[in-house]
Image (cartoon, rainbow, N blue to C red):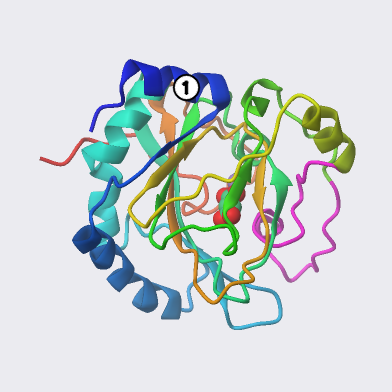
Amino acid sequence: MHLTPEQISDYHEHGYLLVEGVFDDAEVERFRAQVPGIFADDSPARVLEEGTETVRMTHGHHKTNAVFGDLVRDPRVLLPARAVLDDDVYVHQFKLNAKAAFDGEIWAWHQDFVFWHHEDGMPEPRTVNAAVFLDDVHEFNGPLIVMPGTHLAGRHDEDARDTGLTDDDPDWMSHLTVDLKYELGRETIERYAGESEMVAPKGVAGSVLFFSPAIFHGSAPNMSATDRTMALISYNSCENHLLDVPEPRPWFLAERDFTPVTPLG
Ligand code: SIN
Ligand code: MN
């Protein structure tokens, strides 16, 4: 439930920490049982893989689904988030990333914090992502890839680009599709590749990958026959709450209720 001092310092040094076997099989089954109904719901918070009916991701279920509502308050994810941020936290964003068998597409290299800073008015990268594996993550189903240490490389927004969306698409779609607005460019990755290896933390369902919103990360397409569903909770430090912006994004992308999350039980 509590990270050890070594785990906390590992997190701060490398920008990520994999904790295996946090949730047991019965708990994972309970999470997984929620997913088909959620994915079938044609809501604005659901994004499909381009040109398909396959779900890429859906948002906000910590507020619409009791099981995921409990998950964000579970001490096994909440207490580590509070520990690495050294503050009370609230949920900035909750999403289910599907990365479906065969159809799950690429996530280009990016830093989450660039989106949250520019689009949502988040002052600092005082956020931690907790990615709860709902399926086993292996080398063939598109594991998340991180570049350890790059969470200290500062904000790289010089490669922002026009993603070619039409006027009919809401602007926030450009943060969620294969063509990301704030993708990290090749020169940036090349520059840091000399100093940082790439790591793809893998583990059984029920493991949790904590990672910094400033770390360079992405993932390859899923070429396997097994899904790689993850519940991704982005906890923000309450002191780092969002500032006003001219066009706030929908609540399911950028929460503006900064009430601290309290642990279950
Ligand atoms: C993300 O960067 O938020 C998601 C990446 C992935 O699901 O592989
Ligand atoms: Mn990301």
| Residue at screen point 44% across, 32% down | 236
The answer to whether 34 is drawn above or below residue 109 in the figure is: below
| Residue at screen point 79% across, 32% down | 193
Over which residues does the magenta segment extend?
Answer: 161-185
Q: Nearer the viewer, residue 213 or 123?
A: 213
Q: Quadrant of residue 84?
A: top left
In this picture, residue 1 sits left or right of residue 186: left
Q: Quadrant of residue 56?
A: bottom right
Q: Position of residue 211 (x, y in %)?
A: 51, 36
Q: Position of residue 165 (x, y in %)?
A: 80, 65
Work out which quarter of the rendered image holds the C terminus and state it.
top left
Q: Position of residue 135 (x, y in %)?
A: 41, 63
Disc 1 on helix, strand or loop? Answer: helix
Specify the principal SS of the magenta part: loop
- Residue bearing the label numbered 1: 10
Magenta stretch: residue 212 in it?
no
Q: Nearer the viewer, residue 74 or 229?
A: 229
Magenta stretch: residue 163 in it?
yes
The answer to whether 7 is drawn above or below residue 128 in the figure is: above
| Residue at screen point 44% across, 75% down | 39
**How many residues crowd mark 1 within 10 Å: few (<14), some (14–19), many (20+)?**
few
In this picture, residue 191 sits left or right of residue 13: right
The answer to whether 180 is drawn above or below residue 154 in the figure is: below
The residue type indicated by label 1 comes to: Asp
Work out which quarter of the rendered image holds the N terminus and state it.
top left
